[in-house]
Every structure is written in structure tokens, then in C-alpha cells.
Image (tube, helix red, strand yellow):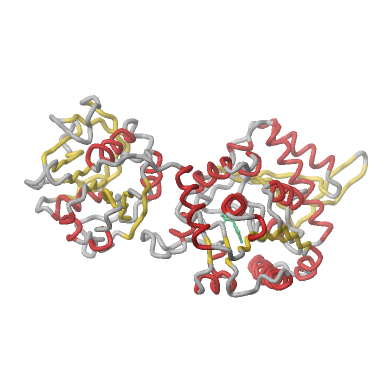
Amino acid sequence: METIAILDFGSQYTQLIARRVRELGVFSRIYPHDARAATLADPEIQGIILSGGPRSVLEAGAPMLDPGVLGLGKPILGICYGMQLLNRLCDGTVVSATQREYGRATVEVEGESTLFERLDSRQEVWMSHGDRLEQVSRDFAIAARTHDGVVAAIEDTSRRIFGVQFHPEVTHTPNGRAILGNFLFAACRCSGQWTVDSHRERAIAAIRETVGDRRVLVLVSGGVDSSVTAALLARALPPEQVYALHVDSGLMRRGESAQVMQELSALGLAHLAFVDASERFLGLLAGVTDPEAKRRILGDAFIAVQEAETARLGLDGADVFLAQGTLYTDLIESGLGVGQQAVTIKTHHNVGTPLVRAKREAGRLLEPNAEIFKDEVRELGLRLGLSPELIGRHPFPGPGLAIRILGEVTADRLEILRHADEVFLQEIRQAGLYDRIWQAFAVLLPVQSVGVMGDARTYEHVVALRAVESTDGMTADVHAFPWAVLTRTAARIANEVAGVNRVVYDITSKPPATIEWE
Ligand code: XMP
């Protein structure tokens, strides 16, 4: 499959570059910046993009490119740091600017240029850099400069090596897509056949070939990723080979487990297993208030239930595959040799349960979407017939409502939270805001406050509302609700949810707060 390799020099935009390339119809894969030339010699790789990065090429120990990459004869595009590196490797020089240039800039295209083919000679671009080219290597022609003379693009058309000082991958560069397209189609001669549909067909063929006539177990949490994996298996294999298991921890939102089972049965799977572990989980949480202890207890309990259920279904044999909804971002963040951004703030993913580890070691782990991004998985899910409501659902943490009840989790407190959460989500949907928000939920606080109802004084629970906008959950901004939505929600919760007399809205961004309260 024709592929563009993206070498990750630590830019915050590396994944965005990968997505842009795919939007243009070419599959992309992220590699560590120091990937060996021998690896990149793979004939499927039609071109190489060097990302930007936070370091300076002038620093000692700055991330380097294997110089052999230049000798592969493949087209290369260096972005920002990547361009500075190319210029240095070809005997040009780079200087530190006195000031970091950041923001919009206008560049003038000089003469014939592959990157700016069919574009006007004046282009708006987005810059973010400290260093700039001083002496441009003799291998390169200058293709564009900013108004104050900074080299903005270089080209060596004979070797098909290019560099841009600006960021074509961000939307602030209005013609960035066209510039990347010129690299992919004019320089790399890609055909642009990759789509989510082509991924689906390839994934289905791969599942069939890998699994043969063996059985597959898929654990469905109710989230988008595991549901899409189940839908893909349902499409790829005869129904009797696929076993879907959903565990109701009792910590889900109102009606959620029933909805999951409904979606699963619509897939036509023959083996749908449902375990109601709510009493067991609640029992284990009795008296527990520490957030990390809750996570640990629930994580262990999930594993125990899964093991027991797998054995009961006769799926504990070494030959049985386990499928999970790992995404490309999970792979990048878990540091499994993809890109260099291995350090994450928290890893919430199933990379490490004993079952997953054992299946991985035995070559019995199926992760059919491990090379696609969340938005691509959503598109795939829709094409596989899952409902837009399921596909558009906000992320929900594995420990569920347990980490949204501060302090001890009890059946009564769960009921209060579930009800308040339901009202909040109803109001958000009613206002048409659900899809603009990354996550919205209610939190039950471990305090009581004084209120007045009728003529009587009350002393009851406080609910906090949280709604944030984010692209990946790593950083988040508070959602700026129309005031009336908040006041209506507060009034409804205080009136309708027994035991609550006060509602507050959390207006903290992440950082410094996290999205969840625990
Ligand atoms: P924080 O609270 O760390 O959350 O800002 C970032 C994202 O991760 C989710 N989250 C979890 N997901 N198990 C999960 O599966 C967890 O223990 C967990 N803690 C937080 C959170 O909902 C948000 O999307």
C-alpha cells in the first residue's frame, strides 16, 4: 500500500500531518525521527516528511536524521525543524533568530515551484519557529520568502527534496492542503487511493486471513472504539466465530448497558454475553474513597470477571483470539515504537491487562484499527451501520461513575448522580450542543450545603457540572454555555433530583485541573 512516512521530531503537529496526508487519500505512518534508512527503504514508502520539533538544530544532541535517508532517492519534505535539518545536512547554515516568529505571515513565491504549483505567488502561511536558514545549501533553490527576507521554502527538484519553514498541516495556512498535495502527487507521484473504505476492506481481509476458522472474543465497553471493532468482526467472520462480552459494572450512566446490548444484537452476532457485575463491584467499593484505589479495585475486578466469563464460555483456550479497539493514538502514546512521543500524562488503555499481554505474546491479539485515528474510526463505524448516537458519544472513563462520586460510592449516591447526569445531558442535547462538547457530565461532591425548599431548611448534596472542549483529552477548555442552559439545568436538578439542593459549574481548564475530578 502506498505510504508516506512521517518522521517525528517531537512536533505537537505530527499526528495532524499524518491525518492531513490521509485526508488527501494517501496512507501515512509515523516513525521515530531516527528510523534507519534501511527501514524507510521499504518500496511501499513513496515519500518522507520530516516533522517540526521543539528543539533547535543548533543544540548539542538535537534529534538527527539518519543521513542515509537522503540517499534513498525518495522525495522528502522537511517542515520547520525538518527543513533546517535538511539544509544543514546539505552544508547550508541555520541561525537562531533573536525572537521566535509565531503567527500568520505572508510569503512570496519565487519563480517555478513544485510545492506552490497552481497557487498564487503570494501565500498566507502559519509560522512557528525560533531558528531560520542563513546560508541556503547550494543544492536548493529558494522557492519562497517572507516579506522581511526569511527563507520560507526551498526545493531541490532533481533530488525531489523540499523544505518549508511554515506549517502546511495547520488550517491557519489556508493553502496548506494544496501544498501538501503538490508534494504527494507532483513530487511523490502518489495515486491517492486510500480511504476509510479501503481500510475497511483491507482490515476485513486481514481478519479473515489471521483468524481462519478460530474463534474471537471482543470485550465491548460501550465506547466507540470497541463497538466499531465488534462491528468489523461481525462483517468479517461468520457469526458463530465471534463472541462479544459486555460487563455491566453498575457504574454506567442511565440505560447505557441496555443500549450497548441493543447495538450489539443489531450487528447480528450469534454469541452475545452480558454479565451484570454491579453488586459485586459495589461491594468491592464499599468504604473506598481514594481515587487510585477505586481504579485499582475496579481494574482487578474487571479482569476477574472477564476471566471467569471467558472460562464459562469455553473461550480460555490458547487458540482463541482477543480483539480490542486500540487506536493509532493509543499506540503512539503507549510508546510501542511509533513516533517518539512516548511520554504521556496518564495511560488509561488496556495495553497491560494479563489477558491482553498473554494474547499479544501468543500472537492472538487482533487490533484491526490500530493504525487509524479516532475520526477515521467514527467514519468507519457509521459505514458499518452503527448508529450516529453511538458514534458521536462522548468518551467515558473505564471506572465510570465511580470516579465522579467523590468519596465513597454507594447505591444511593450512584442513583443521585445518575439522575443529575441524565438531566444535564438532556438539556445539552435539547440545546443542540452535544456535538460541540468533548465531554459533559455531573459530579457528586462529598459535601452538603444548606438550602431552602418551600419554607423548610434543607441540608443536602452539591452537584458539580463539567463540560469541556478538547481534541484529545490532553488539554481542555471549559465550554462556554449560554447562561440559560446552565440555569435551567441547575433548576431542574435541584427540583427533580431528590437529595440535591445546589448545583455549581466547574470553569477550570486543563491544565491545571484534569477533566475528571478524581
Ligand atoms: P483527565 O481526568 O486525566 O482525563 O483529564 C483525560 C481523559 O481520560 C479519561 N479518563 C479515564 N479513562 N480510565 C479511563 O478509561 C480512567 O481511569 C480514566 N481517568 C480519566 C477522561 O474521561 C478524559 O476523557
Query: Residue 422 occupies which quadrant of the picture?
Result: top right
Q: Residue at x 72, y 50 (%)?
A: 265
Q: Nearer the viewer, residue 107 or 310?
A: 310
Q: Is residue 478 left or right of residue 1?
A: right
The picture quadrant for ligand 1 comes to bottom right
| Residue 477 picture location, percent across and down | 54, 44
| Residue 300 picture location, percent across and down | 66, 72
The residue positioned farthest toward the top in the image shown: 120
Q: Residue at x 18, y 55 (%)?
A: 72
Q: Residue at x 57, y 61 (%)?
A: 323
Q: Is residue 335 left or right of residue 271?
A: left
| Residue 426 picture location, percent across and down | 73, 38
Q: Is residue 26 left or right of residue 64?
A: right
Q: Nearer the viewer, residue 398 or 70?
A: 70
The residue positioned farthest toward the left in the image shown: 138
Q: Is residue 452 left or right of residue 189?
A: right
Dividing the image into 4 quarters, which one contains the C terminus?
Answer: bottom right
The residue positioned farthest toward the front in the image shown: 213
| Residue 97 picture location, percent across and down | 20, 46
Q: Nearer the viewer, residue 93 or 16?
A: 16
Q: Is residue 214 above or below residue 21?
A: below
Total residue callouts = 0
Q: Nearer the viewer, residue 270 or 352?
A: 270
Q: Is residue 411 above or below residue 168?
A: below
Q: Residue at x 56, y 52 (%)?
A: 236
